[in-house]
Image (spheres, coloured by chain):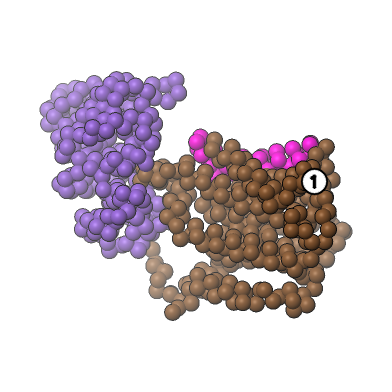
Chain colours: A brown, B purple
Amino acid sequence: MSATPGRIAFATVVAFLGIAPFLPMAGMKQYMLHVVIQIFIWTFIGQAWSLMGRFGLVSLGHGAFLGIGAYATTLLWNFYGLTPWIGSLVAVALAVVMAFLVAYPCSRFGIIGHYFALTTLAVGEVVRLLIIAERDWTGGSLGVTLKAAGDASFIALQYADKQVWYYVGLVLWLAGLWVWARLDRSMARAAMEAIGEDETAAASVGIRVTRFKLWLTVLSAALTALGGVAYAQYITYVNPETLSGIGVSLRIVFAVVLGGMYSLLGPTVGTALTIALSEWLRIVFGVKFIGMAETIYGLLLVIFIIFLPAGIYGSLADLVRRRRRPAAAPATA
Amino acid sequence: MLELRNVTAGYGAFTALWDVTLAVERGEAVAVVGPNGAGKTTLLRVISGVIAPRGGDFVFEDAPLGGRPAHEIVAHGIAHVPEGRRLFPALTVTENLKMGAFLRSARKDFRDSLERVYALFPVLAERHRQRAGSLSGGEQQMLAVGRALMSRPRLILFDEPSMGLAPVMVLRLFDLIRRVREEGYTILIVEQNVRQVLKLVDRAYLLEVGRVKMHGRAAELSEQDFVRKAYVGL
């Protein structure tokens, strides 16, 4: 059996799973635990984004779905005492409706590529501005804290113990990997790749272009909303800047582009690196240079898109593949 | 086999096709010729389901297909070789052919269809692992035709296949279409290269500003003074 990148990725995940359940018990510091939980949750969101991104459906407004997810459950709990277990279903339903409202007209009227990206960018901002404008409900730009329900409440999905969130995050991350791998092996992937390359050609062989694009956008939005719910329940505080709008939307994109959106572990590697980077920048610069982190993100994003479009993980995987089979890369004359 | 009766179609307030009546019999090769802007491409778009006709009937093998979506048209046995070939350049030859058999009905016959295409175009079998974008122009044309055959059609639509090809390639292209025809497929071809296409087909329709101006046997049509002067340039 040769070590293809797919097998290496699979082995890495299995090996990690072997030790993952015991990591928090090995006296992991609270801070480390917090960082790892963030990585799990944001990776899940990045995986959801990459379901679209890898097929050329570049969304710069996933903050919209994230915000809808986080705010829907939070407000339902605070105002009506509705448990997040049901609230999250409402949140997903709302995100699906929103995705449909954006994606249907876009694919119907051929808004693709850059134009699609710009449309989603606007949608993300609209959701952020709506959250700020409805301040009686949402607390405006100050955000809103979840009504506390004790140190450990199943009904409220609130746990002060970070270990619980570690396992929740782990499950989410695995679920994201599973959806990704499932889609990767399906006929839908072939259809989406064809659509990504040439919509006219795809339609000419009988692929239902509009239906596939809608389906994928809805799936991606639903998972992103779930990620928003998980993040809100973990932090127990929601804020329009951290959960909606351009800033957070671009962070999701950046993490995935950095790691590589065409490979299973790309979003994981990218998210881990960006979170590590932002923690490091926070410690180094503190509050001295506000906006420094964003500036460095932006620069890195430009550099990566130009020099490593397959991302760090994707490029490494390609390298391994080429090393193993030097003869398999045909010289195209 | 295919019958259009008084089909009218257009875009927004603009009408590109007026009252077009056209028929293709099983086993026939039929051409639609005419100058730029005559409505040839609109005609194919109606047949392949990209746009819905505004009026008239469109029947294929007794099934009324007017206004049905593209994937249903393909499922009914009409394949489309789009203008400019429209391959998936980053996919390999085999993957391109696989996409041609995307529909459930075609998927189960995939192996068999693949062998038939490779038998018809052996050069594609030689290059099956190569990316479509790295093929020569002629090979890409074969692949575009092969991909259309993968959906197991009975009627194949060709949209301006000679567009953008060098004259020597155009001759080879028409050879290729002739071979497809000899395999028993029915063909409807839209072309600007009137002289060449009239040598290939049985009958032809001449379209002008959205209306059928003339139709008849290809040999007779190419003898008409009007056609010779206006389109063949003899």
- Residue at image position (68%, 60%) is A41
Image spot of residue B140 (x, y percent): 32, 52
Report the residue that reaches farthest toward the right: A288
- Residue that badge 1 annotates: A78
**Which SS class for mark 1?**
helix
Residue A327 locus on image (x, y percent): 40, 74
Instruction: Decide whether residue A123 is among the magenta residues.
Output: yes
Task: Give the residue drawn at x 64%, y 64%.
Answer: A171
- B40 in the magenta segment: no
Q: Quadrant of residue B84?
A: top left
Return the chain for callout 1. A
Front residue (pair A135, A286): A135
Helix, strand or loop: magenta stretch: helix
Horizontally, is B231 left or right of A264 in the view? left
Side of A304 relative to B171 (left or right): right
Q: Is residue B15 above or below residue A28?
A: above
The span picked out in magenta is A106-134
Foreground residue, A192 or A31?
A31
Mark 1 Cα shell of 10 Å, populated few (<14), some (14-19), many (≥20): some
| A103 in relation to A297, above or below | above
Q: Position of residue A29 (x, y in %)?
A: 80, 73
Task: State left or right for residue A124 relative to residue A107.
Answer: right
Q: Residue at x 47, y 46 (%)?
A: A212
Residue A68: in sight, yes or no? Answer: yes
Left or right: A138 in relation to B101: right
Q: Quadrant of the C terminus of chain A?
A: bottom left
Q: Residue at x 32, y 62 (%)?
A: B128
Residue A266 visible within the image: no
Q: Quadrant of residue A279?
A: bottom right
Task: Please state which amino acid type lies under the numbered disc 1.
Answer: Asn
Residue A280's x, y, as percent?
Answer: 78, 66
